[in-house]
Structures are given as structure tokens and as C-alpha cells.
Amino acid sequence: MPQDIKALLERKLITLGGNPITVESLLAGIAIVLITIVVANALAFSVRRLLRRRGSPMGAQFAIAKIVRYAVLLLGFFGGLESMGLRLNSLLAASAVLAVGIGFGLQNIAQNFISGIILLVEQPVRHGDFVKVGGILGTVEDIGLRATHIITRDEVTIIVPNSSLVSEEVVNHSRPTTKLRVRIPVGVAYGSDIGRTKQVLLEVARANGDVLEKPAPEVRFEDFGDSALSFALYLWIAHARDDLSVSSALRFAIEKAFRDANIEIPFPQRDVHIRTAAPGTKSLD
């Protein structure tokens, strides 16, 4: 090796914690980190493919592959620092005050990181699950180190901090089952044949291919309303994410079936009383 190149590689750039960092050690550390990234991605892909062949659930494949990738990246990162000649224990000992300040500043990031590990290990929410978070419904696309990406029905990506999924209320429509019970309220006019009303509603539900036979649909007479007799059709569908489309199709079918059966869906009615002034009195403008 030429002396000038050797001298360049051995040139000291900086000293941290009493440990000099040279050009050679810096390049070695960067090389280790880059190689680690390639190895981590390849290993995660291989693990996921192996689990897929063994028939493991998609959520488990995603979680295990993520954990393997993070573990390899962490080892490679520390290995790169060691190759640079940087000793973390001496650096932290020499920078205790700075470390405390950084710790307070990164508290939120650390909380989300630990929450992300909990999500991957315990898997209360998995990749591909259909969930409701803060009133927003969507599919879990990715669980990252800091946040989870949820794609809504409008194809909008919502970034939710991992700590929110661990500490706040989350409705998971994919576990333990993807089924969902749907309620469709409907009112009929007073004087209608309630037996016929129940029969028509059940026929509409059974005619829809997305409605499950078990549990069977049912009709409940819920209340005597101001302008209508209040009924509700309860039924189960196989996938919670289809509730809007199935509900809409059933409402179209109910309206047509009620017209064919001469069952009236009333509109709110109000009695208006008009008082006229007595003869000989003046009205007030």
C-alpha cells in the first residue's frame, strides 16, 4: 500500500471518550453498517418466506421478520461503532450530563420504540388487521419503530404513534374473528302489519349473499316512535370492512320490498294549529 494512502487512512479525525477515530476506522464502521442493512433485509425476507411456506399467519410472518431485521440492525450498528474505535461505555461516562439531556429529549421516541416492540411481540394488532383507532377505520399497513401506518377506506395513510395503540382503546375487527354484526334501523307507519314487516325484512336479509346464515338474521321491534313503529334488522357479515356496502345494498332492497308489499315508510308528521283572531279584534302586525 502506498505510504500516502496509508497515512491518509491512519489520519486521526476526532477523539471521543479518549478513543481516536481514524479515516480507516470510520470507513470500516460505515462498511459494516451498510453490509448489516443488506444482510438484515435479506434475512428478514428469507424468514418471512420460510414462515409463509409453513403456513404461518400473515401477521406472525410480518412481526417475526421485523424483529429479526431490527435485531440484526442493532447488532450491526454497535459493531460499526466498535470498529470505529468508539467505546460506548467510555463515551457515556465522559458525557453523562449530555446523555441525561438526550434521554429526556428522546423520551417520547423511546416510548414509541418500546411500544412498537410490544406490538410486534404480543401482536394485539397485526399487519393486515382492520382496526378502529380514534374513530378512524383502516387496515394496518406497517408497524415501524416509531409509528404504525393505517390506510383508511379513502386510501389515506394515517400515521399513529405506537404508544397510542398500546395505551389507548383500539377496536380490532380482525381478531378473534373478522365477522361483524350489522344493525339496520327502519320505521313503518302505524297500522302496518308488523308480522308481514318482520317477514319481509328477513326475506331481504336471506336473499343477500353477503349475509351469513349462522348466526341467523333477526328482526327486533324496538320502539313506538312519534311517527313510526321502529324496527331493526340485525345480521352478521363475514368481513367487517364490507359493512358499508352490505348495509347500502340491504337498504335498497328493503325500500323495494316494502313498496312491493305496500308497507309504508312514514316521514315525520307535525300537527299545525292556526288560531284566528275573534271578530272585532285587531291583529298585531
Image (spheres, grey):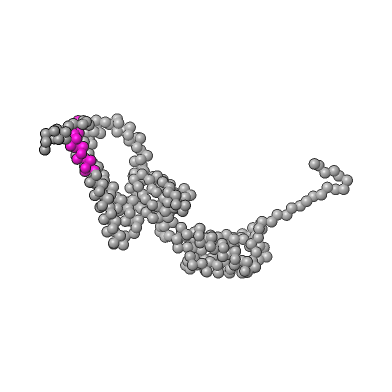
User: Which quadrant holds residue 227?
Assistant: bottom right
Q: Residue at point 43% right, 60% down?
A: 178
The residue positioned 58% from the left and 69% from the top of the image is: 199
Q: Which one is in front, 226 or 51? A: 51
Q: Nearer the viewer, residue 247 or 31?
A: 31
x, y (%) of residue 156?
Answer: 44, 49
Relative height, residue 25 to residue 237 (above, below): above
In this view, the residue farthest toward the right is 280
- Confirm whether the magenta stretch covers residue 31: yes
Query: Who is closer to the viewer here, 132 or 16?
Result: 16
Q: Quadrant of residue 74?
A: top left
Q: Position of residue 49 (x, y in %)?
A: 28, 58
For the magenta stretch, what is the residue range? 17-33
Q: Residue at x 14, y 35 (%)?
A: 5
The prevailing secondary structure element of the residues shown in magenta is helix
Q: From the viewer's perspective, tell me whether residue 78 is left or right of residue 153.
A: left
245 left or right of 65 in image: right
Question: Is residue 64 visible from the viewing direction of this image?
Answer: yes
Residue 50 image offset from top left, x and y in percent: 27, 59
Camera-nearest residue between 53 and 39: 39
Is residue 20 at least partly visible in the picture? no
Q: Pick the quarter of the image with the C terminus.
A: top right
**In percent of the image, x 24 and y 30: which residue is there?**
94
